Image (cartoon, rainbow, N blue to C red):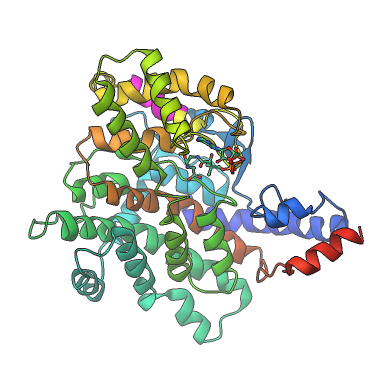
Amino acid sequence: TKSLKETIEEVIPVKQAHLKKLKTEYSDTSIGDVKVGNVIGGMRGLRAMLWDSSVLDPEEGIRFHGLSIPDCKKALPAAPGGKEIIAESMLWLLLTGQVPSPEQTRELSRELAQKGNLPSSIESLVDSLPRTLHPMTQLGIGVAALNHDSSFQAAYEKGMKKSEYWTHTLDDSLNLVARLPALAARIYRNVYKPGAALPEINPDLDLVGNYTNMLGYGDNHDLTGIPSTGGNASAHTAHLVGSTLADPYLSYSAALFALAGPLHGLANQEVLRWQLSMLKEVGEEVSHDTIKEYLWKTLKSGQVVPGYGHGVLRNPDPRFIALQEFCESKPELMNSPIIQLVKKTYEVAPGVLKEHGKTKNPYPNVDAASGCVLYHYGLTEFKYYTVIFGVSRALGCITQLVWARALGLPLERPKSYSLEAIEQLAKSG
Ligand code: CMX
């Protein structure tokens, strides 16, 4: 069977030819206008980014190389003993556009486990950080410092050819993905369980199994995340920083600091806070009408309903639906008061938000459920939730870094304008 690198090597010429075709045949073809609203509206809706591994459709949600999340669940090898997609198979799909065999997936798991230990200098660095420093800041620092051993940077200094960029980017990216569980688990231990023993990487476990094991939850695939990719703030940051030829560690570290912002990655923590205070106020045996009242109280106090709405999606987020289905397949989860409340809230919130009439998307996003599942499993340290997000999200971001180098994509450099200049441009049509 072919290795991951061999498989990518085969796909690269096909993608390069496709890019060349676009360049020669369509470079001057317009695929949309730039409106003043796009420029002052956070570039929302602007068709301005090449991201080959995924496309986010407003109606049906994300597709990875053409596969929706339900398609992925059917096609990709599952985690041992479970039905959830194994992270390694998703990584393979994102990198190659192909569905790996179970053997290829296992081989990738073994490779990642072999590479998973942190260098001792990084362990000392992370251990020296104050416990009170936010776990996301610690993760970003640790990831950036991993560039001490960057293969890309070393090869660049020696004057590697452009055609070799992608192999070194791939080496660094796989090392980064491999080391994230040990790094993130070490931060968890240092902040919340100081002095506790930290299990070693187990070569027989896959990436998520090792992560949950090091967090102290055994080999538990119920905590797996689904990567999100594309123009969102963190993925875009990785892409932008990567376009300067900064190595994958520096690029992903920058992405993590974007994810650490409250408008982005912290939302799952906010959902949990909100649902818990609802639970406290209304109790477990709550009616739909009481939840409606609670929703209106939140809205009338000028706050947003956390976990609802989306910058692009106009339907329930398929990642939310996948999490709901996952909960429904586990009786112990369905008995959890907080997960029951998430479900009941979903039954009434879209109606209330439609009546409220502001949000373009009255449906739940992935964050409406993710934090509550973690909470149910006993991971109650809210400030750590975004770190877990940061571990799973790496799969999507590093994939794009490899492809950007394989396709020779250039430095990102949009043209910026002042208020005055925008007004003049608008007036002159
Ligand atoms: N509750 C109440 N009002 C909401 C709302 C919600 N969940 N979502 C949007 N609105 C309001 C907006 O605040 C905005 O109001 P103003 O016109 O007064 O400013 C109006 O509806 C229009 O917003 P929109 O175009 O529908 O949404 P945006 O693209 O501007 O924002 C998002 C998207 C996710 C930031 C927003 O829906 C929100 O704040 N949701 C709650 C927080 C949340 O769940 N974030 C997680 C997002 C997932 C992720 O990408 O990480």
What residue is shown at x 31% (from left), y 21% (from top)? 340
Ligand 1 image position (quadrant):
top right
Is residue 370 within the magenta segment?
no
- The number of numbered discs placed on residues in the rendered structure image is 0
The answer to whether 334 appears left or right of 366 in the picture is: left
Q: Is residue 347 left or right of residue 405?
A: left
Query: Toward which corner of the image does residue 345 lie, by quadrant?
Result: top left
Residue situated in front as seen by the camera: 226 or 151: 226
Above/below status of 238 relative to 347:
below
Measured from the top left, where is residue 127 in percent x and y?
Answer: 18, 69
In front of the other: 138 or 11: 138
Is residue 387 among what the camera can see? Answer: yes
Magenta segment boundaries in residue numbering: 321-329
Left or right? Give the position of 145 relative to 414: left
Could you say which quadrant of the image residue 369 lies in? top left
Relative horizontal placement of residue 171, taking residue 198 as reference (left or right): right
- Counting from the top left corner in percent of width and height, residue 272 is at 32, 37
Percent x, y of residue 307: 44, 36
Instruction: Examine the rendered structure and indicate whether residue 24 appears above or below residue 300.
Output: below
Indicate whether residue 324 is drawn in magenta: yes
